[in-house]
Image (cartoon, grey):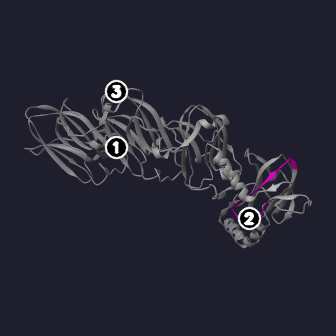
Amino acid sequence: MGRSLLVLFGSLILFVTPTPAQDQLLAEIRDLTTNDVKMDGFVLEKEQEVSIRGIGAGDREWDASTSAWILNKETRAVIWKVRNAKRSRHSRGLDEYTDLVKLPQGEYEVYYAAFPDWSRDIEGFGELLDYLADRVFHSNSHRREFRELGLTVRGTGRRVGREGVVEWHDQIRKRALVSLGGLWDNEYVRQGFILEKPAQLALYAIGEITDDATDDYGWIINTKSGDRVWQMSDINTQGAGGAAKNRMVTETVTLPAGSYAVCFVTDGSHSYRNWNAPPPYDPAFWGITISVKNESDRKYAKTIDFKGIEEKNLIVDLTRLGDDEFRSKGFTLQKPVDVRVFAIGEGRDDRMYDYGWILDVNTHKKIWTMEYDETEHAGGDQKNRMVNRILHLERGGYIVYFVTDGSHSFRDWNAAPPFDPEHWGISLSAVGEGFGAKDVSPYEERADKSALAQIIRVGNDERRQERFTLSKRSDVHIYALGEGESGEMADYAWIEDADLRRVVWEMTYRMTERAGGARKNRVFDGTISLPPGEYIVFYETDGSHAFGDWNDDPPDDPANWGVTITLAGESNH
């Protein structure tokens, strides 16, 4: 069985050899350990040629990968990479690198990274044991070789050291409009900002993106509408150096005047100070930095506290849902209204696992559901799905539902979270002008006054009954929901003649149809004729899958799990 372990960083490292006495030591990196990234910096007062020398990983005799590079402090551009240097044999597994590079006046950052090389293909268990034994028995020599790794830069200028580079980074962040950088694992950071006039913004973001998932990434939203105005993805990013999953974007966007929020989220591995693979070329700016392109516009931009999307005309808010939740909220519209439905849930392979729907309480019919085909990617893992659409609702009563399964939900993600994790669930808000508080009221669930008998919201292991009387032969409407599989009903209703104790109607599998959700959810929605007399309606459930304790997807109309009997044409829902 073949297995390819992760390919980590490139080739290199440098160490110092004697140089002309007039050259000053501008940068020096040494004393590296495994999974180590070190930096230094220097200033050149004039254009000149600097000498670079060092020791780095060479051939496959040594299970480590090393790399070194130099950044321009202002542009953040890589102006030198060790792989471009002249290479010669140094010792077992190590090579010496030398180079002369002409640099203009400016400030520069020097980096060196050393990581174990897990790129070796291992065939079979025996080869795996040999590989591990080799790493154990040669660990001491590897530690000695790590001590030989190093890099020096010499020229005429001033060395600032690691502390100076950190100070440079702080200066860049202070000049920016927003800088959310140096992020660690499992972070979700946000910053609001206002543009008093349209402005061009320079975006600089570095994160973790692969073909399968967007793990560490950022986005910008309009806080009034909730719309994304920009998002970091595999399409608008390019390699950021180091591991292939390190991705970066340098982009200019123009935004109109308004209120915005920039957000960045990281998953549980591979971030600043905790890399599990070679880091990007600019590790300290893992995250996102936003600057105003034209300095004259800077006075029209300022940061603000971000407390969430402005929920104007919010009707329903079922968000921030965790595992195994089943939530609902009803409302009554006093006039026809257009509403925005914004929902984020989990779906894959054309099926939704965390999803919402809307029920018309008058007809018991589902008027909208979060179908996989209607969703789009919500950022992060591909199973994060989103709907953002406008629905027209007529005057009347509605109930909004949302259900989650046992994994991957707000604050307990088992894969990369969506771009807007706090909206995991569903919300409805009115759109357009002329909508006011008087146009909507809470839906008050009450007993159907026209019902002859009603047994609803039935839980597990229940057996309930009610009586009703007919003074003449009548057509009665029966609306019953229950559980049925393989031609048999487990939760069901029946009607008996109270005097004869004879069953006059029974909810059988064949007379039912699917009630939405799991296939075993069944519904009978029809009319029968009964002679005058007294009747008893029964409803019975087994030990699983009933109101309040679903073991599979609930039906479209879960609150009516049970049976409702009315005179035909007289329902008061």
Residue that numbered label 2 is attached to: 32
Residue that numbered label 3 is attached to: 336
Q: Residues within 10 Å of mark 3 (few under 14, many from 20)?
A: few
Q: Earlier in the sequence, mark 1 or mark 3?
A: 1
- Magenta stretch: residue 356 in it? no
**SS for tag 3?**
loop
Image quarter of the C terminus:
top left
> Is 69 situated left or right of 343 in this image?
right
Q: Residues within 10 Å of mark 2 (few under 14, many from 20)?
A: many
User: Residue 117's image quarter?
Assistant: bottom right
The region drawn magenta spans 28-48
**SS for tag 2?**
loop
Image quarter of the N terminus:
bottom right
User: How much space separates mark 1 and mark 2, taking CA atoms?
Assistant: 57 Å
* Of 10 and 480, the residue lying toward us: 10
User: Residue 333's image quarter?
Assistant: top left
In front: label 1 or label 3 = 3
Q: How far from the left and from the top, in percent, is residue 497?
A: 11, 42
